Amino acid sequence: MQLGTIPDDEWKLIEKALISFTENNDWQSIVRLRDLFNDLFARDTLGGYDLLQQLDLSAIQAARQLGDKAELAHLLGARGHNLHRQGYHRDAIKAFDESAKLYWEIGKDFPAMKSYYMTSLCYRALGDRNQAKKILNDVIQKIDPSDGWFGQPTQVLAWLARDEGRLGEAEELLWKSLELHKLLSDPDMLIAGTLADLGEIISIQGRVGEAKKLFEESLAIIRKHEGQYDRQEARTLLKYSETLMHEKDFSGAIKLLNQADAKASRYGHYYDLLWQIELAKAFIYLRQRDLINCFYKLRSVFRIRKYLDLPASYFMVFVLRRYFHRLVNKITKSTD
């Protein structure tokens, strides 16, 4: 199921059904209606669709009324993922924490740990790397390193190493993560995301040709799924554009950023990606000495970040991490 393939008359039927179930306190039917869209909620953030957001919240309330801890844990976990993808990291942490607690209460340790693990991504996004590391270390101690799922915390460890400028370590962890992802069933999006991360790390280290091949491979995997993973595609395009920008291919970078913008704005309202896209455009305009457009893009960045209630102090850390590492590495190589 894809959003664009659902006719308007079917949306109206869904809305009428939800209203009817709600008026009659038919909690079980609300949960079943929400379950029909599990694949969509797993693939995309649906912030742009008020009806689906309403259905999601109604199903969570219905599961509470039913006292169905397993279903409630599942719904809260899915909501946490979508909140995180949009950039509402604090709200996502609350959803994941409750999901993990409920799973632990009913003895489902692995799903509980998966929800707990996701909070590490949220804390990193909020700039609290110490808490992210603590959670990852807790998780890693409970998983067999040969388990394919181990690739996910390994990938986040690579992000943290990249944050701190340990690029060689980050690359090594990403290659390890990639091999672990391949052990899973249906690993395409995990592989595509890791390839994009590798492209970024490798391009910072100056191996631009190799990086471009990795970005293209990532995009090829995502595009096989015909628009089902807009956020992933926008994420790869953003990382690819930053490589072009540092190669002074500004027109190519802007072209990719415009594509990323269209993907991030389409269905999901991926605000966390949108401010990063705007920031990349601001840097391009700055390097082109187009100060007016640079100012407008920076204003957009701060507007989105304020809307998401992201810490202002982390913005500077993000800028230094995202762009300063490339500059330092380039200067270092030129003086070798």
Image: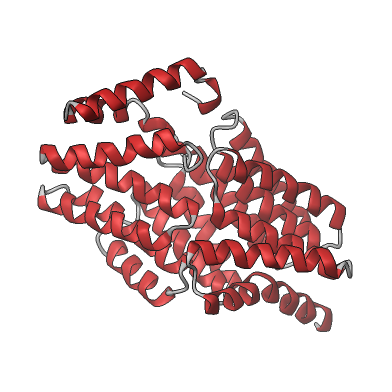
Horizontal side, residue 44 vs residue 61: left or right = right
Which one is nearer the viewer's eye here, 242 or 314?
Answer: 314
Q: Is residue 214 above or below residue 28?
A: below
Which one is nearer the viewer's eye here, 282 or 179?
Answer: 282
Q: Spot the residue most to the front.
A: 23
The x and y percentages for residue 183 are 41, 42
| Residue plotted at (61% across, 44% down) | 265
Q: Is residue 315 above or below residue 153?
A: below
| Residue plotted at (58% across, 40% down) | 230
Q: Spot the residue most to the right.
A: 289
Which one is nearer the viewer's eye here, 316 or 50?
Answer: 50
Q: Quadrant for residue 37, please give it.
A: top left
How many numbered circles are shown?
Answer: 0
The x and y percentages for residue 306 are 54, 67
Q: In this view, does 85 lie above or below 171?
A: above
Horizontal side, residue 117 vs residue 282: left or right = left
| Residue plotted at (83% across, 79% down) | 334
